[in-house]
Amino acid sequence: MKFTLLVVIAFAAVAQGFVLPLEEVQLNGNVIDNLVREALEYIRGLLKQNEPYTLPAVPQQSIVDPDTGVNLNVQVSNVKISKADDFKVNHIENNLPNLWAKFEVVAPQPHMEGEFTISGRALEKDVSGSGTFSVDLTNMDQSGFIQMGLKNHGLYIANMTVDYNLENAKFSISGLDVSGMSEADINDYLNKNLIPTLNANKPVVCQKVAEQIMAKGNEIMAGKTLKQLIDWLKNLIGH
């Protein structure tokens, strides 16, 4: 999520200069590529130097999908990621006149672990508990589309979509209670069905992630001039 947020801010900074020219900042054709590239390297450095890297906390999420019978309240905390600094950038595309950007990155074999609290229903069963989890992912592909808009002489994120794909996932969880299933049953089920389950609930999960990024991005950009936005980004990535 942090990668996506930095791409959004880098694109917004240059887009603002494109549609709202200001004498205080000189832009050129390469500035957006440079800012996005440096934002990526900033994240790579964070992941490498602080491994395992603790991901920012996120609010409790309600995941509801009537089509699959999922109705869950989920809180994850102290989530750490490792083996992710070798991510590859498959695609970066920007369209300043129309104020949109696209991106795609792939992490070959990241590892994540953390703590969780959950309650609700899934698989037509009661689900509850709190404990720990870990997951080893293979080829985690993340992509997104960002559409900016103009409001009160400033830019904001008008719309955003994100997507993900996984080749494989090996999951381990402790402390999860699912009616009629032992812990061994739960882990066996997750390892056989995690990817199909994630894919089945992808629209809901992706919407939640996009909403969080839009809210944080618009909070950062609110009231900032072009120079302030670029200075904020440069300060973040170490200029």
Image (cartoon, grey):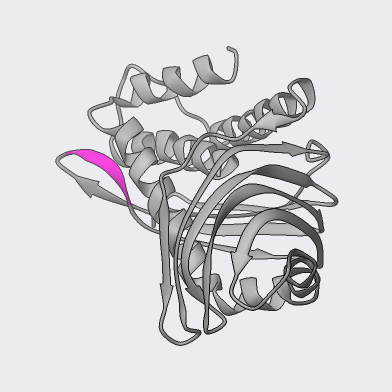
Q: Is residue 127 above or below residue 39?
A: below
- Specify the quadrant of the image occupied by residue 18: top left
164 or 133: nearer the viewer: 133
> Residue 37 appears at what percent x and percent y?
66, 34
162 to the left or right of 175 = left
Q: Is residue 225 above or below residue 216?
A: above
> Residue 195 appears at what percent x and percent y?
72, 72
Considering the image in quadrants, where does the C terminus appear?
Answer: top right
Residue 138 magenta:
no
Q: Which is the main secondary structure of the residues drawn in magenta?
A: strand
- Specify the quadrant of the image occupied by residue 15: top left
Q: Can residue 137 be seen at all in this image of the molecule?
A: yes
Residue found at the very far bottom of the displayed protein: 67
236 to the left or right of 136 = left
> Residue 79 appears at what percent x and percent y?
63, 39
Tell me the residue at 47%/83% (across/down): 69
> Residue 198 appears at what percent x and percent y?
63, 71
What residue range appears in magenta? 153-157
215 to the left or right of 162 = left
